[in-house]
Amino acid sequence: MPPAMDAAANENEVRLRKGTSLNERLVLAGIAAVLCLIALPGLAHLADGNWLGIAALFALLFGCLLLVAALFDRNVVWIITPGEILIGEQRPFGKLHRRSIRDDEISGMRLRKSIGKSVEFTLVIETESGDTLTSPPLPDVTQVQKTTLQVAWLLQLPAPELVENPLDAANPRIRLGKPVSSKRVRAYRALVLLLGCSLSLPFIYALWSGKLSALGIAVWSLGAIMAFLLIRYLYRTSAFWIVHDGAIRFERLSLKGTIETGTFGGDNVERIDVESGGRRGSHYAIAIRLRTGRKIRSPVLVGKDQTRAVRAEIVRRLGLNPPDGR
């Protein structure tokens, strides 16, 4: 089963899925096998207390953990239909375990928001027998309210209390990131000043005393480049978007350390893409290229599926044509 769930097939069914696809398992198992093969020769140094043997042991243990995760991670699917939840669980090479829960066996349902690597919303079902079951994550972070109300209608349950979700399509405005405050501007300027002084003082002293060598100049230049990259990183990640119907208002920290604001509508947009967030492989950003040639990046989002869902909602609100095949 794919790790993310497809949208509801129709109004009378909701499918929630969690698990790892076959391709992802094969990649994980391949990485584990390579780690184990690399680590095995180094175990010969373990008896001598050599650091190479200790490193090989840790690499072998980590490879084994990856292999176990690839082989034994469960795939779970919930199929919610009128009056019933059908739950299926299966491990690779194992039997499919099914369980059916009727709506008259359910004593309550609530929506839960989990914040880890990414923001996830799940349904917590409590049964008359005292069991508490947690569903796989809801599929589309922009459709949490709609999916939750649909599930409540299918199971003939009271609608649960909704959890605050700034990315939900039911909101009049979608908010990405946090507002850029004056405190952040002051902290930004102080960081630039402190970083510049820390990097420059030793080299200024060496230059004044006549001891600045070619190597020192090279290190100084490298430090200046690293400082520039850090400043640019802070500038790119300090952003706040408010998406209305027909327009986006943005705030961001400029390279000069001031708060830059602006608004643009769908007529100004040439293209909307999903790009790497620049920090980790799971971090992404929405990049909007305007007809003037200017590109504006959104705050960082976690997960490609979540980022694509937010992009689709932005495209809808701006009245643009969806990108082909993406």
Image (cartoon, rainbow, N blue to C red):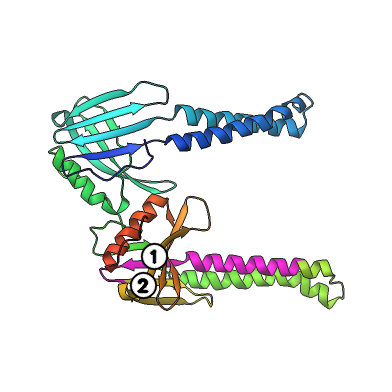
Pointers 2 and 1 in contact (C-beta within 8 Å): yes
| Towards the viewer: 282 or 196 | 282
Residue 238, magenta (yes or no): yes
Q: Which mark is residue 4?
A: none
Residue type at mark 2? Val
Is 190 positioned to the left or the right of 309 in the image?
right
The residue labelled by disc 1 is 272
Q: Secondary structure at mark 1?
A: strand
Is 206 positioned to the left or the right of 169 in the image?
right
Is 285 positioned to the left or the right of 203 in the image?
left
**What is the chief secondary structure element of the magenta stretch?**
helix
| Towards the viewer: 298 or 208 | 298
Q: Is residue 294 placed above or below 229 in the rendered structure?
A: below
Percent coordinates x, y for residue 279 in the rendering: 53, 55
| Towards the viewer: 318 or 164 | 318
> In which quarter of the view is residue 123 placed?
top left
